[in-house]
Amino acid sequence: GAGVSQSPSNKVTEKGKDVELRCDPISGHTALYWYRQSLGQGLEFLIYFQGNSAPDKSGLPSDRFSAERTGGSVSTLTIQRTQQEDSAVYLCASSLLNSPLHFGNGTRLTVT
Amino acid sequence: AQSVTQLGSHVSVSEGALVLLRCNYSSSVPPYLFWYVQYPNQGLQLLLKYTTGATLVKGINGFEAEFKKSETSFHLTKPSAHMSDAAEYFCAVSGSGGGADGLTFGKGTHLIIQP
C-alpha cells in the first residue's frame, strides 16, 4: 500500500522567504509527527498530532514554525522568514496509536 | 525523561564481518526500544522493536538486537555484513508502544562496509 508521502522532495529558498512542506500520511493513521534532521544531530522532534486532540507543539524551535493537520489527514509544516539555520531534512511520520512510526522520504530544505 | 546514546557516529566493517552497533538508553519507565535504518535520500525504516517478552528480537535483513536491562543496552548485531547494509542506523526509546510523543532518537551511527 501507499506509504507516507512528502512534497516537495527538495526545496531551495532565499533567506527571509516563507516555505510550506506537505505530508500525506498513511490512510487511517491517527498519529502524525514532524521531525527535523540536521547533519550529525540525529532527529529533532518538532510537533505531534493525535486524532482530534490538541497538537503537542513542544518541539517547535521558534514561533516562525507552525503546523496544521486538516481533516485528520494531510499536514502542512510552515516556516516563516526562513533562516540559514533552518536548512535541514524535514521528516514526517505517521502511525496507529501505540505502534511504530512509518516515515516519509523527507523534504530537503536549503536556505540560501 | 528518557535518552539514547549511540556509541560511535561512524562504524566501519569488512564485508562478511560481524556488525555491532551499540545503543544505551535511560528511561524512568519500562522502555520500548527500536532500531531504524535510513538509506541515502530516504526516510527511516523500522528494523526491529522490543516491547515485552523475549529479550532477543529478530528484525529484517538478518539483524537482531538483545535487550539487557542490567546494562541498559539494546545493541544491534548482524553476523555477516553485506554491502547493502551501508546506511545510517538510529536507536530509539519510548515509554509506550512507540506511537506517542515520547519517542526519543539517538544521533545515529553511519555504518560503512569495506569490500
Image (cartoon, rainbow, N blue to C red):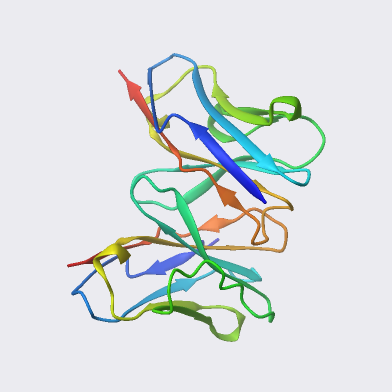
Q: Residue at x 62, y 53 (%)?
A: B103
Position of residue A21 measured from the top left corner of the image (x, y, whole percent): 38, 74
Position of residue A111 measured from the top left corner of the image (x, y, whole percent): 22, 68
Q: Quadrant of residue B39?
A: top left
Q: Is residue A62 left or right of residue B56?
A: left
Q: Residue at x 34, y 45 (%)?
A: B40
Residue extending farthest right: B53
Residue nearest the observer in this picture, B47 or A109: A109
Q: Residue at x 46, y 43 (%)?
A: B107
Rendered position, A71 above or below A33: below
Q: Quadrant of residue B82?
A: top left
Rendered position, A31 above or below B68: below
Residue nearest the observer in this picture, B49 or B59: B49
Q: Quadrant of the C terminus of chain B?
A: top left
Residue nearest the observer in this picture, B82 or A10: A10
Position of residue B53 measured from the top left corner of the image (x, y, whole percent): 82, 35
Q: Residue at x 73, y 51 (%)?
A: B95
Position of residue B13 measured from the top left corner of the image (x, y, whole percent): 39, 18
Q: How many marks?
A: 0
Rendered position, B27 above or below A93: above
